[in-house]
Structure formats: C-alpha cells, structure tokens
Amino acid sequence: MKVCRDLYRFAARMIDTFKHKGQRERLVQALIQKGITDDRLLKALETVPRHAFVEGAFSAQAYQDKALPIKRGQTISQPFTVAFQTQLLQLRSKMKVLEVGTGSGYQAAILCEMGMRVFSVEYDKKLHEDAGERLSDLQYAAHLLYGDGSQGWQKYQPYDRILVTAASPGIPESLKQQLAIGGRMVIPVGTRSRQRMTVVKRIDRMEYEIEALHAFQFVPLRGKFGFEEE
C-alpha cells in the first residue's frame, strides 16, 4: 500500500499544469530583473518543472526564489543561484559538463535542457537514485554516478565546464586536472558558513586564472577533498 502511495505522489509531481507554467514565467521575469540575461538559460528555467524536484510538503513553494529542503539534510538551490552559476559557465551547444553534487537533479535537468552533455556525480546513494528516477521520467539523458564528486569523474575527462554545487574548502586539484584547456569551472569556495563564487579558467596545461566573485552559502562538499564530516 505504501508503495502505491509513493508512486501516486511521484506521478503527481510530474504533472505540469498551466498554473505551474505561469509561475515559471513569473520566476523567469524576476530572474531577469536580478541580472540573468542568457536567453537559452532563461528558456530552460521556463521549461523545466522545478516542482518535480521538490519534496511534496514544499511543492507549493517550488517557484519562489529560495532554496528548499530535500532529503538527507540537503537542499535544492535557490533558482537565482542555479541561474547565476549556470550563466557564469558561459555555455555553448553540446559542451561536456561535469556537475559535482547531483542533489535533486534540477541543475542537471537545466543543463540537459540547454543541450549540454551532462555528467553528474552524487555522494549520497539515495539522492543519486531519486535524481535518476526524476530525470528519466522527464526524459533528460544525464550520465549519473554514485561516488565522490570531489575527485571528479576520470572516465569521461576532460570537461569543457565543471560546476560544483556544494561549498568547498578549496579548489580540488583533481577537478582542475579534469578541466579541458580553455575550460571553465564554477565553484563556491570558503568556510562552511560563507563562500565566494569562484571562476577557474584553465589557460594551458599548468596555468589557471582564478576569480572570486559574490558571497553565497551552500551545503558542504563531501568526499576526499570536501569538508570533514562533523
């Protein structure tokens, strides 16, 4: 009986109504006012049903511009944060993008909707499994891995872009090495309570250009090059 109820709730989240579409349109207009200008990104944000990635109790808040809790003490990022990070990547068609921290799968869906080849790694097995189900049901063909994202995903390197969706105490050397020459990585770097969004550009085999931007707050990156478990 519980399985049936769970399936019903999951199916209900997949329904995309005119109300949801109107809410997304209003959210996109708000993001434009906050400085998001990438047309392809805005189109993806208007298309991907964020409510499908939000836990049932919070579904009514899915199109508010704020972070929301998901399972396992994690969050689905604020839409502005998703948009800001994605815009910083300066994406072009069919780029190979590594995402560190699949979480709910929402960011991966945005990247897929923009036409990227997405490779996403999640440290938590349950989040990895749930995200895979959501993305599959929505027909987004991201490549997903359950593992330590702080070490990247060696098998498919190099990546044109790397996006880290959790707070890191530094820039992991493993991720720098998996970035293609000419590639960009966007990663929040700092303490557990405060980070600066950081852009890493790989100039050549040994040289990187690093720029720290605005302050944000993310959940901690876990794994070998993340924060130690408390």
Image (cartoon, rainbow, N blue to C red):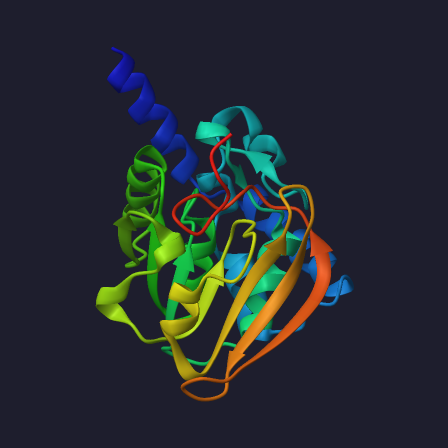
Q: Is residue 6 above or below residue 156?
A: above
Can you give x and y, in whole percent of width and height, for residue 218 in the image? 60, 46
Q: Quick one: 113 or 18, which is closer to the camera?
A: 113
Where does the image place residue 29, in percent across and percent down from the top left?
71, 60
Residue 109 in sight:
yes
- Is 156 positioned to the left or the right of 31 in the image? left
Give the number of callouts: 0
Q: Nearer the viewer, residue 202 or 105?
A: 202
> From this viewpoint, which residue is outermost toward the left?
155
Residue 36 visible, this orientation: no
Going 47% across and 54% down the picture, which residue do you hit?
107
Q: Work out whether 19 lies above or below 178.
A: above
In the image as oriented, which residue stretches furthest toward the bottom? 204
**115 vs 74: above or below:** below
Q: Position of residue 28 (x, y in %)?
A: 65, 58
In the image, 156 versus 203, the foreground residue is 203
Q: Position of residue 40 (x, y in %)?
A: 53, 72
Question: Residue at position x 55%, y 61% from top?
Answer: 187
Q: Residue furthest top?
A: 1
The quadrant of the image that shows the N terminus is top left
